[in-house]
Image: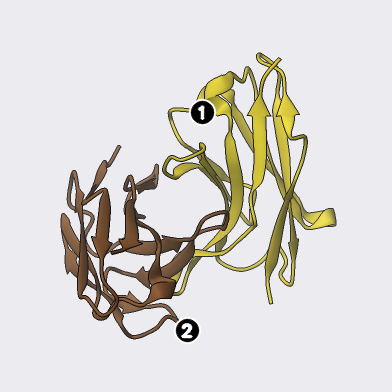
Chain colours: A brown, B yellow
């Protein structure tokens, strides 16, 4: 099974800050990585697919990069509505797997 | 607009079988290049992929659950189901159903989630 490791586990930042979350796969997953945003009590929502492609309707302040084993989610200017937990997820191999999550809070 | 909705008992006794159904509206579960998927999340914890079933009825399961797991499609009612037997407290979680699409890839949409508690 492919293990996905996110860092940091939690992050506190100010409105307007640039925020970066990293995700590392235990083996090469090529570009087959997505990022999800989950707000309390809600289902996750897709932000990024194929490592760097923005899902329709997602604000352009979100971006993704990487390939192989190392990936990054960046929020260019943090907004109050971005407070959530973020998960990376690989879909290169079954069983699909998620990172443990990064909880983003406002400072 | 495609919508998914989970349903089933919210409380299951240890050693018994957890059964959930996901009702789909706005799309046919027996057509298209989609995988109908179950994902769970214990309280305060991360997401675990449980398994998926294709439009043909072919299924893939997480090896960690495979010996206890069965997924099925019910095309006549446009729903798919999950059965997990011999449950323990470790199976207590919010269970989400979701559609995995390939073009572009990703889980979308998701159901709202159903809390299942395993307790006597």
Q: Quadrant of residue A3?
A: top left
> Which residue does the image show at 77% across and 34% down from the upper left?
B9
Chain identity of mark 2 = A
Q: Position of residue B31 (x, y in %)?
A: 67, 66
Toward the right, the furthest residue is B76
- Report whether B63 appears left or right of B15: left
Q: Which residue is mark 1?
A: B66
Label 1: chain letter: B
Q: Which residue is at a point 34% across and 60% down the rendered structure image?
A: A105
Residue tagged 2: A57
Q: Residue B86 is drawn in which quadrant?
A: top right
In this view, the residue in front, B12 or B16, is B12
Residue at point 46%, 83% (across, down): A56
Q: CA distance from mark 1 to mark 2?
A: 36 Å
How packed mark 2 is, by other alpha carbons closer than 10 Å (few <14, some 14-19, many 20 or more), is few
The residue located at (78%, 58%) in the rendering is: B78
């Amino acid at each position: 099974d492919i293990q996905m490791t996110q860092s940091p586990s939690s992050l506190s930042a100010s409105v307007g800050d640039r925020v970066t979350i990293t995700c590392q796969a235990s083996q090469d997953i090529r570009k087959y990585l997505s990022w999800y945003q989950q707000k309390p009590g809600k289902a996750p929502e897709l932000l990024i697919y194929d490592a760097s492609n923005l899902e329709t309707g997602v604000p352009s302040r979100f971006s993704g990069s990487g390939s192989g084993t190392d990936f990054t989610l960046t929020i260019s200017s943090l907004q109050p509505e971005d407070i959530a937990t973020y998960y990376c997820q690989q879909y290169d191999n079954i069983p699909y797997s998620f990172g443990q999550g990064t909880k983003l809070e406002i400072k | 607009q495609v919508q998914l909705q989970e349903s089933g008992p919210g409380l299951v006794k240890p050693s018994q079988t957890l059964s959930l159904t996901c009702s789909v509206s706005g799309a046919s579960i027996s057509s298209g290049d989609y995988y109908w998927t179950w994902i769970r999340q214990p309280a305060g914890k991360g997401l675990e992929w449980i398994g998926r079933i294709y439009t043909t009825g072919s299924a893939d399961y997480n090896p960690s659950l495979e010996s206890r797991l069965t997924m099925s499609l019910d095309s006549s009612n446009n729903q798919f189901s999950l059965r997990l037997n011999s449950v323990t407290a470790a199976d207590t979680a919010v269970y989400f159903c979701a559609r995995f699409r390939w073009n572009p890839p990703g889980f979308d949409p998701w159901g709202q989630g159903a809390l299942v508690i395993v307790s006597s």
